[in-house]
Amino acid sequence: MIHVIGVGPGRPEWVPQATHDIVAQCDAIVGSSRVLHLFPELRKGSYHLSGDMVQSLQLVANLLEENMVVGVLVSGDPGFFSFLAALRREFTEEVINAHPGLSAVQFAFARAGIPWQDASFASVHGRDLASLPRTILKPLAVLTGGNNTPQKVAQLLLERGINPRISVGNSLCYPEEVWETLDAEQLARYPQPLSNAILIIYPTFPQNPWQDNALRIGIPDREFIRGEVPMTKAEIRVQVLAKAQISLHDHILDVGAGTGSIAIEAAALAGEGIVYAVENDPEAQELIRANQRKFAVSNLQLVAGTAPEIFARIPPVDVCIIGGSRGRLAAIIEKAPLVQGGRLVMTAVTLENTLKGLEALERLNFADIETISIQAVRWPKISDLHMAQSLNQIFITSARKGGEL
């Protein structure tokens, strides 16, 4: 039997008697020196875990082969970015018993004085910084460590175009504890070393959906910065996004992004993915940047250039949305970096352009090809009457990449 035992933040006063009782039942205790010192009475039968995952797992396996009851001590709680995940991959769940402890995230949210049942969680300790979610829609707790310091996390957020408020906790519950709330710019310049700190990054957009810079689906046209560049109307936008079937982690390509209205709303749906907005017109590029700033969208990347040549700079995507094609629709469909099974959605105002797209989709063995046409009619109030205001009819074609190309 393996008991995976959470020992909290590493201070004796935060180790309850129940944890001592479980440890006393074990024949062998393994853990880092940081947690083993909490149980000085167990010098005999204690083993230091190395930083090598393979060696650590082998040590536990060897002790089990000797029919020992093994206690594996982990800091914090075993269910939160701990050795438990590796143990479950190596051993059957029948031999593993997990026992909770106080985690760093509990301390951090207690220090912040806010509930955490709706928060998101991430770790960059030994992981790529780029794995952090690009859109922060609710408080995000981040475990740092190694080379990925709080300062580097803050710098990454600034590079993504956002400057959120961040609470940083270092050595929580120790005499040298640091707890401060500041913005990303201030944290990036923070002079004091912060090792193995926990961060709480707060949402960067207004929570009130009626504010005209709140990120959501079906944003009224008037809320976008528009200039003279054509924009997909809200009624069409929601249909395009529905056909795209965007998921939380999707990578999305928006070709001919215009003002960025579709890209902005796609980014809201793919909160932990990314949207590549391809646009060749310099005026439209500036509008995309302006709308990205207005709606505080961090998971949108403007790619300035002409499709399909620019596709060489774009990694594989799950969804491709084609608006403007500048007469190169077939080539764009053929060369789009869409994964097998990925969804493609294209819009057109003419039947002829729609037919060109359908021909290309058939030739390239796309599946689930479907075309609909929509003509929305708005009924604004003029004086005492409501008068019809017809929008252009739009063709929306959707398909799935499949088969041998």
Image (spheres, rainbow, N blue to C red):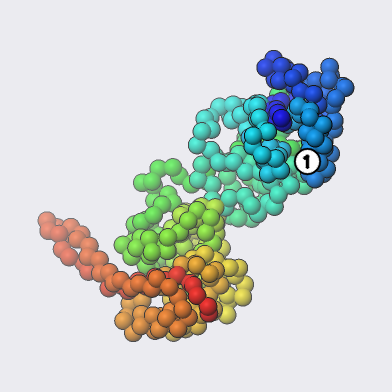
Name the residue at the right extreme: 44
Counting the numbered discs, the total is 1
Q: Which residue is mark 1?
A: 57
- What percent of the width, then of the height, locates residue 290? 49, 61
Amino acid on which the number 1 mark rests in the picture: Leu
In the rendered image, the vertical position of residue 329 relative to residue 156, given as above or below = below
- What percent of the width, then of the height, locates residue 293? 51, 56
Left or right of residue 93, residue 256 in this image: left
**Residue nearer the viewer, 272 or 25:** 25
Identify which residue is drawn at 74% across, 42% down.
Answer: 145
Q: Quadrant of the N terminus?
A: top right
Q: Secondary structure at mark 1?
A: helix
- What percent of the width, then of the height, locates residue 400? 45, 70
Identify which residue is drawn at 25% across, 66% down.
Answer: 376
> Is residue 139 visible in this depiction of the protein?
yes
In the rendered image, the vertical position of residue 40 relative to residue 387, given as above or below = above
- What percent of the width, then of the height, locates residue 90? 71, 43
Q: Quadrant of residue 321?
A: bottom left
Identify which residue is drawn at 45% across, 59% down.
Answer: 246
